[in-house]
Amino acid sequence: GESVGLHLPTLSVQEGDNSIINCAYSNSASDYFIWYKQESGKGPQFIIDIRSNMDKRQGQRVTVLLNKTVKHLSLQIAATQPGDSAVYFCAENWSWGKFQFGAGTQVVVTP
Amino acid sequence: NAGVTQTPKFRVLKTGQSMTLLCAQDMNHEYMYWYRQDPGMGLRLIHYSVGEGTTAKGEVPDGYNVSRLKKQNFLLGLESAAPSQTSVYFCASSYGSAEAFFGQGTRLTVV
């Protein structure tokens, strides 16, 4: 079936550097994508979203890029901080709110 | 607002026992979901509901049942627990196809 996957299971980033987390999706009909952050022992929290009619969206210190040609999604975190250490999931909307989640990328911020 | 509240937070069951996980949301969301999260995997949809009195199967529904008798509550039942159901369970709710808000999770161990 269709799936969403992440290229890197673990990403180690030095504090202050920028982080880039990648995600590949295969359902060309998906029209809405979300990035979630999950800290240890907590539920996922919404970070940023993007619709398929856009290729870039910016939030506070985060930017999501969407390349529909190659079905690729990325999350960029500027000036990574210790509080950014978490697992990051991308999710694609299959239909009316049903989302397919990727396996997640563990981001570890080192001092 | 409390958001999405799950009870209990932890539970240990013996194989064959039954239990019900309760999810409550105070955001007046129409859509509610139950996911399970296993190590190294993303969230997988068990069952979902698009409104009071309606439920539907997700990606991994076998061994689970749900009920949505009230708009704010979504119950997940395990009739006869199996070790394969050891997991962390997350409830979520959303307003239509927008981002989902997740609870803190229920860690279930079946021995």
Image: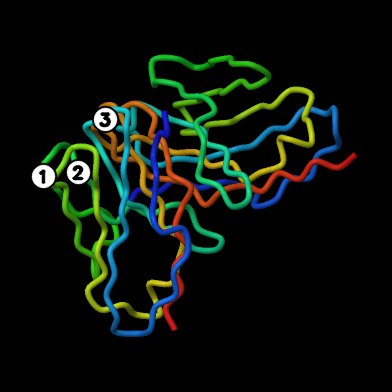
| Location of residue A103 with respect to A26 vertically, above or below | below
Q: Which chain letter matches label 3? A: B
Q: Which residue is mark 2?
A: B49
Q: How is the image coloured?
A: rainbow
- Residue A32 position in % (x across, y down): 37, 27
Q: Quadrant of the N terminus of chain A?
A: bottom left
Same subunit, tags 1 and 2 = yes
Disc 2, SS: strand
- Residue at 54% over, 28% down: A47
- Residue at 79% over, 45% down: A12
Disc 1, SS: strand
Under mark 1, the amino acid is Thr
Which class describes the residues within 10 Å of circle 1: few (<14), some (14-19), or many (20+)? some
Which class describes the residues within 10 Å of circle 2: few (<14), some (14-19), or many (20+)? many
| Location of residue B13 with respect to B4 vertically, above or below | below
Label located before the other in sequence (1 or 3): 3
Same subunit, tags 1 and 3 = yes
- Residue A60 position in % (x across, y down): 64, 16
The alpha-carbon separation of the residues under discs 1 and 3 comes to 14 Å
Give the side of residue A103 with respect to residue B4, left or right: right
Q: Which chain letter matches label 2? A: B
Return the mark for residue B54. 1
The alpha-carbon separation of the residues under discs 2 and 3 comes to 10 Å
Q: Quadrant of the C terminus of chain A?
A: top right
Of residues B107 and A49, the one drawn nearer to the viewer in this rendering:
B107
Closer to us: mark 2 or mark 3?
3
- Residue at 42% over, 34% down: B2
Return the mark for residue B83. none
Which class describes the residues within 10 Å of circle 3: few (<14), some (14-19), or many (20+)? some
- Residue at 83% over, 29% down: A17
Q: Which residue is mark 3?
A: B29
